[in-house]
Image (spheres, rainbow, N blue to C red):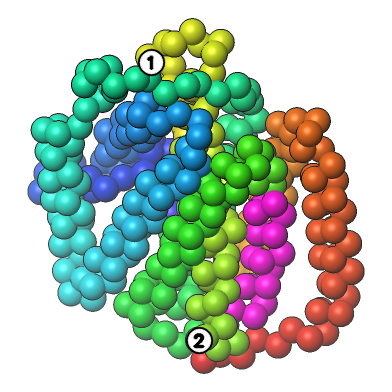
Amino acid sequence: MEKIESSDVSAHSSNTDHIKEGFPWRDSPVTTEILSGIVQTTGWPGVVSAVGKWFGKEKRGLIFGIWNSHTSIGNILGSVIAGEFVETNWGVSFIVPGAIIAFGGFIIFLFLVENPSNVHCDLPTSGDDKGVVEFSLCLFFAKLVSYTFLYWLPLYIRSSTTLGPALSGDLSTLFDVGGIVGGIAAGVVSDYTGMYATTCSVMLTFAAPMLFVYEKFGTNNFSVNIILLLIAGLLVNGPYALITTAVSAELGTHHSLQGNSKALATVTAIIDGTGSIGAAVGPLLAGVISSRGWENVFYMLIISDIIALMVNNLQTSQSELIWHSLICNTYYRAYFNSIPHNYFLLNEVKF
């Protein structure tokens, strides 16, 4: 099943799976998922381009951070819908999201103004940042971690605790709740400092040890699970949200593009498309590695976060270099010095 899901994400994330419920091609789920993902891939570049054209560099991070919360809200809604019908009628969990997205598309078609110039508004000023390749590769690994959680977290919670499937699905939505806060926080900090790369690096720096902590202590009791899920979601989804929105808009309006109206959507497609490959690879790897123990899945996610941090450092400007050196030195000293002590304290307790 993880291979079928990955075939969809490799084209892009999907909410149109309900199509296969009523057509003969339901016997070919891989083909259906690929076609569904291809349809969905048109969405993200278009909406980032539309929003990006309306806002200049000032407070762009905050605006996109709030706006991007719709992705986590959608994940939460999807998990709740699936959990509601998981033991009764799975087909409804595909039909309801399909109806929601169709209604949303109809509203956008009627009311969306794509360009400020269409209503005689001034165009926003463009930014000066570069780094499409670096941010694309960083998003590859950041999205790998995020989507692995999205697909596998309910199963992990169910297998490592005594919770049922419905409650496990509901509990997993807290990861996305933390992601909403993380996206907004990353946007606010990047607006205040003007340092997109450093903002991502700080969150990635703390995300890796937080995944380690969640794997070791998350099943101790229900309250600890909730707290750690919220923090992990904040740290993991913060950089992901910032790169796919504010950073993409910043790079797409670079002065070297000479006002090309199609450039913003193209840059967004390149960055998010690269990230979507990671979103396909992550759940697929998790399916293979989980057979050897869930701790190995978390080690894979931790390594991915560290690689994302290293790639993101390639985008660091000279003004940000001191901050990166301080952050990395503090992280590695604290994290690795704690491992020998924590090793003997770990004791997983079921609840």
Query: Which residues lie in the magenta part?
Result: 202-219
Q: Position of residue 338 (x, y in %)?
A: 85, 72
Q: Does the magenta stretch include residue 341?
A: no
Q: In which quarter of the image is the N terminus?
A: bottom left
Q: Main secondary structure of the magenta part?
A: helix
Residue 253 makes an appearance in the image: yes
| Residue at position x 88%, y 62% in the image | 333
Q: Is residue 331 left or right of residue 145?
A: right
Closer-to-camera residue (120/264): 120
Q: Where is residue 268 in the image (x, y as percent from the top left)?
A: 45, 28
Q: Is residue 257 left or right of residue 76?
A: right
Mark 2 surroundings: few (<14), some (14-19) or many (≥20) residues within 10 A? some
Nearest-to-viewer mark from 1 and 2: 1
Q: Name the residue under label 2.
A: 222
Task: Identify residue type, mark 1.
Answer: Lys
**Corner quadrant of residue 32:** top left
Residue 72 is marked as none
Q: In this view, does 297 lie above or below 119?
A: below
Residue at x-position 53% and y-position 46%: 187
Q: Which residue is drawn at 38% across and 38% down?
A: 12
Task: Assign a secondary structure to mark 2.
Answer: helix
Residue under label 1? 262
| 211 vs 35: above or below | below
